[in-house]
Image (cartoon, grey):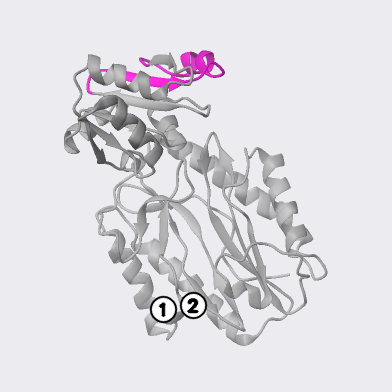
Amino acid sequence: MLKSEKIKDFLNDNNVDAIFIQKDENCRYLSEFTGSDSYLFLTKENKYLITDSRYTEQAESETTNFEIINHKGQIGKVIANIVKSEHISKIGVERNFTYRFYMMFKELMGNVIFSFCSPEVLRIIKTEEEIACVREACRISDVGFEKTIPFIKAGKTEAQLRSILECAMLEEGSEGKSFDTIVASGIRSAMPHGIATEKVINEGEIITFDFGAIYKGYHSDITRTVAIGNVPEKLKKIYNIIFNCVEQVENILKPGLKASYVDEIAREILRKEGMEEYFTHALGHGVGLEVHEPPVLSPRDSSVLQKNTVVTVEPGIYISGLGGVRIEDTTVLTEDGISVLTKYSKKFLTL
């Protein structure tokens, strides 16, 4: 389906005459414009990209069938003029719609009604071009980690390993990091989001790396956990539990399943091992122009997974005072299963 048709259907489904878009990722998806400081105003008949003089030429070259408007610091007046000329009475707005914009619009537009919408849902099912971008971002992250492996040893700090990994991804073609790279060693690995510190890596510790690359705006997300020397047997057992959990979930994951059902499958696997209480987050999430986007593989998301949706699978066990293990893949749903896009081995690696 063409994006213009998606927009019309979205407006009809949400019972609005137009939608005002502020979020950069939604602007980029709906217009192809890669700059910043831009807004979209989309009606059933017309598409407007509103920016300032720094970006008008870029917007004209990157977009198709958009009217480019230089707002000259008068965004509210620009929108008000469109609303008046197209007789718009109800406008959809994103969840991040600010009070400042609300008050400005109400002052200029009087009785116009505003309704919250979630245009992110338009981005859930990826095109082949989008999937190719995510696949390349995953390749970059795989190669970046492979280049980092020789440097992972006792005596290095978490921060040093983070820098080596991020530089390796940049050298391979990443546009940046998907998020603050996680390098958590020893008992700090029990922190699901243990951002790298100056802590020195020691023999007998486990290290969790959670990182991602960006290619043409699209993200990857991967977690691998490695051991430095001989680690406690309990951590080895936990690793095997998580490894088997990932394998089993990826074997059943396919279109037609509810996101919440897939999450429950993982929890049941860990429940049988007596480890469910140590799994403290959702099983996974969508990946695309944002590293975290719908759908969410969690008990609270009952949406049905569809072909060409990109999701992560990332179970983890975190035990305070001992450490934690997480393994994460980025995957794309195919006709009757998935394709795993992050290729670096998930087998237990001792360095």
Magenta extent: 44-66
In this figure, which residue is indicated by the disc labeled 1? 270
Quadrant of image for the C terminus = bottom right
Residue at far right of view? 155
Please name the amino acid that badge 1 sits on: Leu
Residue contact between numbered discs 1 and 2, judged by CB atoms under 8 Å: yes
Quadrant of image for the N terminus = top left
Q: How crowded is mark 2: few (under 14 residues within 10 Å), some or many (20 or more)?
A: many
In this figure, which residue is indicated by the disc labeled 2? 241
Badge 1 marks a residue whose secondary structure is: helix
Q: Is residue 97 visible?
A: no
Q: Does the magenta stretch include residue 65?
A: yes
Earlier-in-chain disc, 1 versus 2: 2
**Side of 281 where 172 appears, left or right:** right
Label annotation for residue 212: none
- What's the residue at 42%, 60% (across, down)? 284
Q: In this view, does 291 lie above or below 107?
A: below
Task: Tell me where residue 283 appears, x and y as whole percent.
Answer: 41, 64
**Side of 278 where 264 appears, left or right:** left
Residue placed most toward the observer, 103 or 177: 103
Badge 2 marks a residue whose secondary structure is: helix
- What's the residue at 33%, 41% (across, down)? 125
